[in-house]
Image: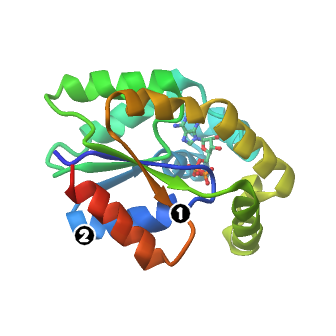
Amino acid sequence: MLNIVLFGPPGAGKGTQAAKLIEKYQLVHISTGDLFRMHIKEQTELGKRVKDLLDNGILVPDSVTIDMLEEEVQKNPDAKGIIFDGFPRTVPQAAALDAFLASKNSDIKAVLQLDVDEAELKRRIAERKKVSGRADDDEDKLVKRIDEYFNKTVHVLPYYQAQGKLTVVNGIGQIEEIFNNLCSAIDTE
Ligand code: ADP
């Protein structure tokens, strides 16, 4: 299976690039942020539990996130590969994903990090807020999300670097150009 982790801070363009990658490589897209928002919209038990966390830009506890993720992977037994978008966001999540995939005789092929500086992230999300309607796109919540990224999520990078799976791609530039760089990284794996 061609399993890929798309990695990067809020506003790095993971959603945009994931949409292009799934089309080209015929992959299943699993975005934990999208899944949580769907649960909130449908007012499921899980949705009620995580709503305040999402609205405030705080990470959902690992156990809750990992259970939801594994369930979603199980729903796609025939997938040629999966793009993980917004997951893993902590080292325990990364370790859980490795163990889970190993139990299916599979693994992560590549981790692609979209590199975008903080000033550009803030500019992009301020722009997105005009249309997204996302409570967590408010400026104070965004600061929290960027904080969570730099305090907790960046530690996932050395984890994958140690496995020789990490490629950093410049996330600033034309969408097509960034996409081509991501594809080259995948094709050399
Ligand atoms: P973005 O990348 O724009 O910050 P996402 O849509 O990926 O946003 O995630 C939105 C929110 O969902 C996060 O701020 C967090 O509250 C929750 N979330 C998503 N993925 C995870 C995860 N892997 N672990 C914990 N919380 C998560």
Between 130 and 167, the one lying in front of the other is 167
Q: Quadrant of ligand 1?
A: top right
Q: Quadrant of the N terminus?
A: top left
Label 2: which secondary element: helix
Could you tell me residue 120's position as x and y percent?
Answer: 71, 64
Q: Is residue 104 above or below residue 13?
A: above
Between 141 and 184, the one lying in front of the other is 184
* Residue to which mark 2 is pinned: 24
Amino acid of disc 2: Lys
Report whether 13 appears left or right of 70. Answer: right
From the image, state whether disc 1 or disc 2 is nearer to you.
1
Could you tell me residue 169's position as x and y percent?
Answer: 45, 57
* Residue to which mark 1 is pinned: 171
Report whether 129 appears left or right of 106. Answer: right
Between 3 and 58, the one lying in front of the other is 3
Could you tell me residue 108's position as x and y percent?
Answer: 27, 38
Q: Quadrant of residue 147?
A: top right
Q: Residue at x 48, y 76 (%)?
A: 175
Estimate how packed mark 1 is, as few (under 14), some (14 to 19) or many (20 or more) residues with alpha carbons within 10 Å.
many
